[in-house]
Protein backbone atom coordinates (compact mmCIF):
# COMPACT_ATOMS: atom_id res chain seq x y z
CA UNK A 1 0.00 0.00 0.00
CA UNK A 2 1.37 3.40 -0.95
CA UNK A 3 1.86 5.86 1.88
CA UNK A 4 0.48 9.36 1.30
CA UNK A 5 3.24 11.57 2.67
CA UNK A 6 4.28 15.14 1.99
CA UNK A 7 7.90 16.01 1.47
CA UNK A 8 7.64 19.12 3.65
CA UNK A 9 5.04 20.73 5.89
CA UNK A 10 2.97 23.29 3.98
CA UNK A 11 3.04 25.71 6.93
CA UNK A 12 6.82 25.43 7.18
CA UNK A 13 7.16 26.05 3.46
CA UNK A 14 5.07 29.22 3.80
CA UNK A 15 7.06 30.34 6.84
CA UNK A 16 10.29 29.81 4.88
CA UNK A 17 8.83 31.74 1.96
CA UNK A 18 7.98 34.61 4.33
CA UNK A 19 11.44 34.56 5.96
CA UNK A 20 13.12 34.54 2.54
CA UNK A 21 10.98 37.48 1.42
CA UNK A 22 11.89 39.40 4.59
CA UNK A 23 15.59 38.47 4.32
CA UNK A 24 15.57 36.68 7.68
CA UNK A 25 17.74 33.60 8.20
CA UNK A 26 16.44 30.52 9.97
CA UNK A 27 18.99 31.08 12.74
CA UNK A 28 17.77 34.65 13.24
CA UNK A 29 14.17 33.42 13.33
CA UNK A 30 15.00 30.79 15.96
CA UNK A 31 16.91 33.32 18.03
CA UNK A 32 14.20 36.01 17.92
CA UNK A 33 11.19 33.75 18.38
CA UNK A 34 12.55 31.08 20.71
CA UNK A 35 11.39 28.40 18.28
CA UNK A 36 13.15 25.05 18.55
CA UNK A 37 16.35 25.03 16.53
CA UNK A 38 16.23 23.24 13.18
CA UNK A 39 12.42 22.87 13.38
CA UNK A 40 12.09 24.54 9.97
CA UNK A 41 14.51 22.02 8.44
CA UNK A 42 12.49 18.96 9.42
CA UNK A 43 9.70 17.63 7.17
CA UNK A 44 7.17 17.07 9.96
CA UNK A 45 4.65 19.66 11.15
CA UNK A 46 5.00 22.45 13.71
CA UNK A 47 4.10 22.21 17.36
CA UNK A 48 1.52 24.64 18.69
CA UNK A 49 4.20 26.31 20.81
CA UNK A 50 6.50 26.91 17.84
CA UNK A 51 3.63 28.24 15.73
CA UNK A 52 2.54 30.63 18.48
CA UNK A 53 6.12 31.83 19.04
CA UNK A 54 6.46 32.55 15.33
CA UNK A 55 3.11 34.39 15.14
CA UNK A 56 3.82 36.36 18.28
CA UNK A 57 7.08 37.75 16.88
CA UNK A 58 6.25 38.12 13.17
CA UNK A 59 3.00 40.04 13.43
CA UNK A 60 2.97 41.41 9.89
CA UNK A 61 2.27 38.01 8.35
CA UNK A 62 -1.28 37.30 7.23
CA UNK A 63 -2.62 34.42 9.30
CA UNK A 64 -5.09 33.64 6.51
CA UNK A 65 -2.27 33.36 3.98
CA UNK A 66 -0.15 31.27 6.34
CA UNK A 67 -2.93 28.78 7.08
CA UNK A 68 -4.67 28.64 3.71
CA UNK A 69 -2.33 30.13 1.12
CA UNK A 70 -5.13 32.54 0.12
CA UNK A 71 -4.74 36.28 -0.07
CA UNK A 72 -1.56 38.28 0.41
CA UNK A 73 1.41 37.26 2.53
CA UNK A 74 1.67 40.53 4.44
CA UNK A 75 -1.02 42.38 6.35
CA UNK A 76 0.02 45.65 4.73
CA UNK A 77 -0.86 44.13 1.33
CA UNK A 78 -4.39 43.14 2.36
CA UNK A 79 -7.04 45.08 0.47
CA UNK A 80 -10.00 43.93 2.50
CA UNK A 81 -10.78 40.97 4.70
CA UNK A 82 -13.90 39.60 6.33
CA UNK A 83 -12.08 39.67 9.66
CA UNK A 84 -8.92 41.48 10.55
CA UNK A 85 -5.90 39.19 10.85
CA UNK A 86 -5.82 40.04 14.56
CA UNK A 87 -9.24 38.42 14.85
CA UNK A 88 -8.03 35.40 12.86
CA UNK A 89 -5.01 35.17 15.14
CA UNK A 90 -7.28 35.30 18.21
CA UNK A 91 -9.53 32.60 16.73
CA UNK A 92 -6.51 30.44 15.89
CA UNK A 93 -5.14 30.84 19.41
CA UNK A 94 -8.59 30.03 20.84
CA UNK A 95 -8.69 26.85 18.74
CA UNK A 96 -5.19 25.87 19.89
CA UNK A 97 -6.10 26.47 23.54
CA UNK A 98 -9.31 24.44 23.18
CA UNK A 99 -7.30 21.67 21.51
CA UNK A 100 -4.84 21.69 24.42
CA UNK A 101 -7.71 21.63 26.96
CA UNK A 102 -9.37 18.68 25.20
CA UNK A 103 -6.06 16.84 24.97
CA UNK A 104 -5.56 17.26 28.73
CA UNK A 105 -9.13 16.11 29.38
CA UNK A 106 -8.58 12.98 27.24
CA UNK A 107 -5.35 12.19 29.09
CA UNK A 108 -7.15 12.56 32.42
CA UNK A 109 -9.94 10.23 31.25
CA UNK A 110 -7.35 7.66 30.13
CA UNK A 111 -5.72 7.79 33.57
CA UNK A 112 -9.10 7.31 35.28
CA UNK A 113 -9.94 4.42 32.95
CA UNK A 114 -6.64 2.70 33.74
CA UNK A 115 -7.17 3.26 37.49
CA UNK A 116 -10.75 1.94 37.30
CA UNK A 117 -9.72 -1.20 35.41
CA UNK A 118 -6.87 -2.00 37.82
Image: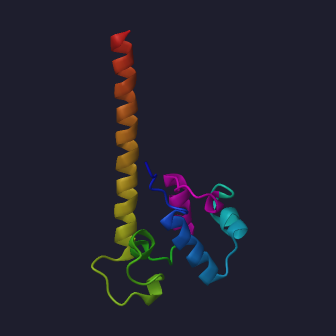
x 66%, y 68%: residue: 29
Q: Is 72 above or below relative to 41?
A: below
Look at the image and tell me whether residue 58 can be seen.
Answer: no
- Left or right: residue 57 versus residue 76 is right
Magenta stretch: dominant secondary structure: helix
Left or right of 46, for residue 1: left
At 39% across and 71% down in the image, what residue appears?
A: 68
The C terminus: image quadrant: top left
The answer to if 48 sits in the magenta stretch is yes
The spot of residue 104 in percent (x, y) is 40, 36
Residue 21 found in image quarter: bottom right
Q: Is residue 72 above or below residue 28?
A: below
Q: Quadrant of residue 19?
A: bottom right
What colour-coding does the image apply?
A: rainbow
74 up-or-down from 27: above or below: below
Which segment is the magenta one? 39-58
Q: From this viewpoint, which residue is outermost toward the top?
A: 118
Amino acid sequence: MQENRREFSILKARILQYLDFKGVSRYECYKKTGMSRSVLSQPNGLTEDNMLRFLDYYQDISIVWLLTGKGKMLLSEQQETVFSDGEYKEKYIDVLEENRRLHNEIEELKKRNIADSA
